[in-house]
Amino acid sequence: MDERGLIKAISAILPDGSTADDCAVIPHGGELLLLSTDMLHETTDFPVGMTDAEIGWMAAAVTISDLAGMGSRPLALLLATGLDRPDRLAGITEGAARCCRTYGADLVGGDTDAHTELTLVSTGLGTAEQVVRRRGARVGDVVCVTGSLGGAQAALSGYDDYWERLIAPQPRVAEGLALNAAGATAMMDISDGLAMSLHDMLGVNECGFAVETARLPGPAGVPEAEARAFALSGGGDFELLFTIPPENFPVAGVEATAVGRVVAAHGVWADGVPLPAEGYMHRWG
Amino acid sequence: MDERGLIKAISAILPDGSTADDCAVIPHGGELLLLSTDMLHETTDFPVGMTDAEIGWMAAAVTISDLAGMGSRPLALLLATGLDRPDRLAGITEGAARCCRTYGADLVGGDTDAHTELTLVSTGLGTAEQVVRRRGARVGDVVCVTGSLGGAQAALSGYDDYWERLIAPQPRVAEGLALNAAGATAMMDISDGLAMSLHDMLGVNECGFAVETARLPGPAGVPEAEARAFALSGGGDFELLFTIPPENFPVAGVEATAVGRVVAAHGVWADGVPLPAEGYMHRWG
């Protein structure tokens, strides 16, 4: 069973709709509180060669990206660390704290434990007056992505110029806030690749998504066919995927590209051909 | 290095005083938001013979207990699960959700991943107008504990009547709120045994603590000397340790026992003899 299958299996136990987005949204005191948690392991999630500080940064960044993907403002982060060696804690904590500061949040605490494999669980708290969910796309909206896609996958495929892109993801916090204010109708961060994210959106919308691969902002300096494949299926970029009425796009201050349209038919298409849900996914034997 | 040593090592990176308590306290919107995270592993933290639902309950309970220990109201909980077998998720989630409901919180989400050893990280969000911290005890206050102590350790030592006590901890949420309102000066939950908790309090207070072991509410039906040892050093009870001015004690609706006094000298004593910091502790080889 893959991770998405598992989540479906427990969705009956959790509150209605709570497994549809990357953050839980809790109305409280006249505003919304957002909570998100991410579990990362050394062998699965951290490319070989990363320093402890880079690992700490990444653990914080993936959670801050979840908060950004709904258009919220990160407030605080906790980091639970299962340590294979106690001397790694300082570097990891320092990297996570630096990432938090960069995005206006505080690393406020955590937990530590011994573990055979380094395991990090970061949990973020954010605030918002309104959020943009994965559900909400409307036929006629443009489908857009921030920044460029496929850089992290390019690094994994040996394009060393993209190493920083892979190990130091930059969550799109300011962009998420601006897109929320500008009327984005649906949004999420692209952690497992664009194709997977489009299918995640498909799962909670009645409409469909048609993208043109020639428009994808792939990694520069990579041969075109490969760049396109990386942009479609490569994980680890942590850009935002969003839909927005065409009259509201572009949004001031947000570097983004329109890559397609929201269509009435329920499906995902790339250049008119059905696009499979392929990309990075956790999988059990 | 033990867990307390590790926490000291990173306290310079985290905000002032943030490692002194079990929850981070974040002033926000005219109130306080509390966040706490706990990492648990099958081999270290879950006694053999527990069902998945019991494991889920316990993971939620330890975090809710941290929120209770500062006198806050649990609002929401997230559960990240590193699964050795995917079919365990439903039972674990169900148990955690039931514990949350019992204490007025919602299980709002989580994350799932594959792991060689079952690993659970629960993160709780609570609210309060004011909190009771570990720091704040005043000379002359009475030292008190809620409920009874040593039952979880009794179960681990073969007293089967205490099995439920061990596997289904009951966080003292209502008690924590009442003690907060009644003017408790210092408070924490006793997760690693009374002796450890008194030393944790000692670390952030200038005063000291003198307890009388004859007053300890140990497990009934266990021979006296053993009961006293369990009550002093046994972990897993999740009762509250608190100090409060004698004129404010007892507190209506809170079942608690005065077991000692806050004294001017800096130390922990049991029956006049220095009490070592012994109890349950995570330790690295």
Image (cartoon, coloured by chain):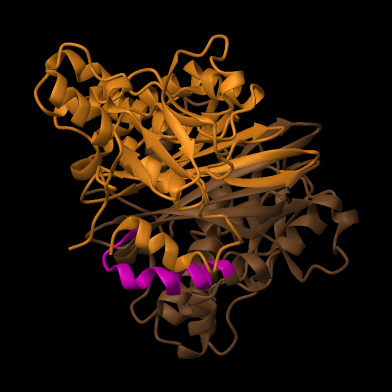
Chain colours: A brown, B orange
Q: Is residue B137 above or below residue B242?
A: below
A160 relative to B18 in the view: left or right: left
Nearer-the-camera pick, B27 or B211: B211
Q: Quadrant of residue A224?
A: bottom right
Residue located farthest toward the left when viewing the structure as drawn? B158
Q: Quadrant of residue A9?
A: top left
Task: Tell me the quadrant of the picture where the N terminus of chain A can be found.
Answer: top left
B282 relative to A166 in the view: left or right: left
Residue B201, percent from left and from top: 46, 45
Nearer-the-camera pick, A66 or A225: A66
Residue B135, percent from left and from top: 56, 45
Residue located at (29% from left, 66% from top): A43
Q: Mark yes or no: residue B142 visible.
A: yes
Q: Mark yes or no: residue A235 visible.
A: no
Residue A38, percent from left and from top: 47, 52
Residue A39 inside the magenta-drawn segment: no
Residue B87, percent from left and from top: 26, 33
Q: Is residue A167 above or below residue B128?
A: below
Segment colored magenta: A82-97
User: How many circles with numbers are drawn on the protein?
Assistant: 0
Residue located at (45% from left, 87% from top): A159
Magenta stretch: helix, strand or loop mostly: helix
Q: Is residue A143 above or below residue B235?
A: below
Q: Quadrant of residue A97?
A: bottom right
